[in-house]
Each structure stands twice: as C-alpha cells, then as structure tokens.
Image (spheres, rainbow, N blue to C red):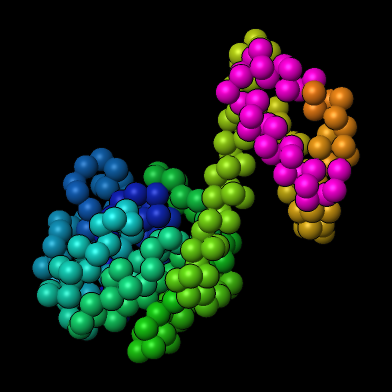
C-alpha cells in the first residue's frame, strides 16, 4: 500500500517518520523544495516530490493548513480516483475533502506539533472518522500508529479541538504571561522557574480531577490576596488585570467561593 504525505509543517514532521517507523510503504513527500522539506525527507527517508503527484498512491495524507484542504481534494478527485485521502485537522469536518471518486477519512492526533521536531505518535490518542467504505482501512492505519484509537465524528472532534485550545494553548499563554510579568518587574529568573510547579500539577491530575486539583487564592476565597494581585497588575501590566479578574471569578463560580 503506497502512502504519500503532503506538507512539511509540524504535523508532517511527526507523521512521516511515524509512518516509516510503523513499517508502512511511505513512497513520497509532497512539499515545496527548501531546507525544511529536504530535512524532513532525509529524516523520514522518503523522496521529496513536487505537486501534483505524477504516480498513483493508495493513501494520500494531507498534512497541510486547514484552508487548503478543499482545493487539494478537488485536484485529487480528478487525478487519484479511488485513493484514500486523509486529513488530520481537529476543526475541519470530513465533508471538506469528500469528493466523488475518493474514499476519505480523518485521523486526528491529540498532540501539539512543531516543525523540526518529531513526536512519538504511539504516545498520543488518535481520533478517527471515515466514510463507511473506508472505515476498516482508516482504523487499521490509525492502530498501526497508536494503541489509543477512538471514533469521533466531526462535531465531537470540534469539541475536542476547542478543549485542546483551553488545555494546551491557553495554558502555554499563561506561562508566557507569567514570564513577561517577571521580566517587567526585573526579576532574575524566567518562566522556567514555574516548570516544577506545573509538573506537580500534571502529576496530581493522574489521580485527581481538574476540579479536585484546583488551588490558589480564588479557590480558597482569599479576596485579600486577589486584591493585592490586581493592584500590582494595574501598575505592572494593566492590560492583564481584567483577564486575572475574569479567570478568578470563574474559579470562584465553579467552587462556590
């Protein structure tokens, strides 16, 4: 079964090596020529090719930005009828690539990707969706990459993706804000000083729910400390004070404090 990956961004940097390591027939990487794509092709041990494909592939995995998916599907419907075409977007429905003549599916890894860094996909859950005719093939392909495979439709996957923004992107933003506050105050440390604290929180979540693990002044109803924090923010980073107030109010609402 010949597979091709389209793209050389963060997802492709983990996907292409994972397909190779799973022993699958990764036949081509389609991406604009350049140092990044050439480096990925070398890591994944796959030929770097120019688009559009000039050879047939049983599976074409679109690891490209969400807004490019419909146009790519249009092209493939004309040139690769019968192929299984996949995307990995959390927020884009399966219908974005469904075209007459194509078999289509989604394999969405719940992970955060970065160009130049290859993640071990076996450590992450995969969420799949497929047309009925492609379901067995999509499921088998996902199971070759990870032992945690779940069937989620497009609506469920969108909820999961929104949750990932809250759990991952927003939490990283909070760390960035903490580092900026220390920088503005001239403290001799950066945001990495919080990493042991954050690791401790993650460890607690192995046995406690997020609600049970919640700590801090808003959780315990410590309005004196909250007032001091807000006064400091007004002088140090006034644009952050309303955000602090809103987040503290939400913690208080959830815990009745």
In the image, is residue 37 above or below residue 144?
above
Residue under the image location 39 percent in, 88 percent down:
132
- Relative to 153, say whether 165 is above or below: above
Q: Going by the image, does 79 lie left or right of 170?
A: left
Quadrant hosting residue 150 = bottom right
Q: Nearer the viewer, residue 222 or 23?
A: 222
Q: Position of residue 14 (x, y in %)?
A: 43, 56
Q: Residue furthest bottom?
A: 133
Query: What is the x, y in percent for residue 55?
Result: 14, 72
Relative height, residue 16 to residue 200 (above, below): below
- Taking the magenta stretch, the answer to whether it contains residue 230 is yes
Q: On the picture, is 201 further left or further right than 141?
A: right
Please state the extent of the stretch shown in magenta in the rendering: 228-257
Residue 92 coordinates in the image, percent (x, y): 38, 63
Is residue 117 visible in the rendered image? The answer is yes
**Which quadrant would the N terminus be assigned to in this image?**
bottom left
State the residue at coordinates (74%, 39%). Answer: 249
**Which residue is depicted at the point 61% across and 26% down?**
240
Q: Nearer the viewer, residue 144 or 251?
A: 251
Quarter where residue 46 is shown:
bottom left
Residue ID at (22%, 53%): 31
Residue 171 is a magenta residue: no
Q: Is residue 179 visible?
A: no
Q: How many marks?
A: 0
- The C terminus, quarter of image: top right
Q: Residue furthest top?
A: 186
């Amino acid at each position: 079964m010949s597979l091709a990956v389209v793209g050389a961004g963060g997802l492709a940097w983990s996907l292409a090596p994972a397909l190779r390591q799973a022993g699958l027939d990764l036949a081509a990487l389609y991406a604009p020529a350049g140092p990044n794509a050439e480096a990925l092709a070398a890591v994944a041990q796959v030929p770097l090719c120019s688009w559009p494909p000039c050879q047939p592939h049983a599976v074409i995995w679109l690891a490209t930005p969400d807004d490019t998916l419909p146009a790519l599907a249009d092209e493939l419907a004309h040139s690769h009828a019968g192929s299984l075409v996949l995307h990995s977007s959390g927020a884009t429905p399966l219908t974005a690539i469904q075209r007459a003549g194509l078999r289509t599916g989604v394999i969405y890894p719940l992970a955060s990707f970065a160009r130049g860094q290859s993640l071990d996909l076996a450590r992450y859950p995969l969420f799949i969706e497929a047309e009925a005719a492609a379901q067995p093939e999509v499921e088998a392909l996902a199971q070759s990459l990870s032992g945690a495979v779940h069937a989620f439709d497009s609506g469920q996957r969108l909820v999961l993706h929104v949750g990932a923004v809250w759990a991952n992107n927003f939490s990283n933003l909070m760390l960035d804000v903490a580092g900026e506050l220390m920088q503005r105050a001239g403290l001799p440390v950066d945001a990495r000083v919080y990493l042991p604290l954050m690791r401790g929180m993650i460890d607690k979540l192995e046995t406690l729910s997020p609600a049970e693990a919640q700590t801090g002044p808003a959780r315990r109803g410590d309005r004196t400390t909250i007032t001091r924090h807000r006064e400091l923010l007004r002088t140090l980073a006034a644009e952050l004070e309303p955000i602090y107030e809103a987040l503290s109010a939400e913690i208080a609402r959830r815990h009745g404090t």
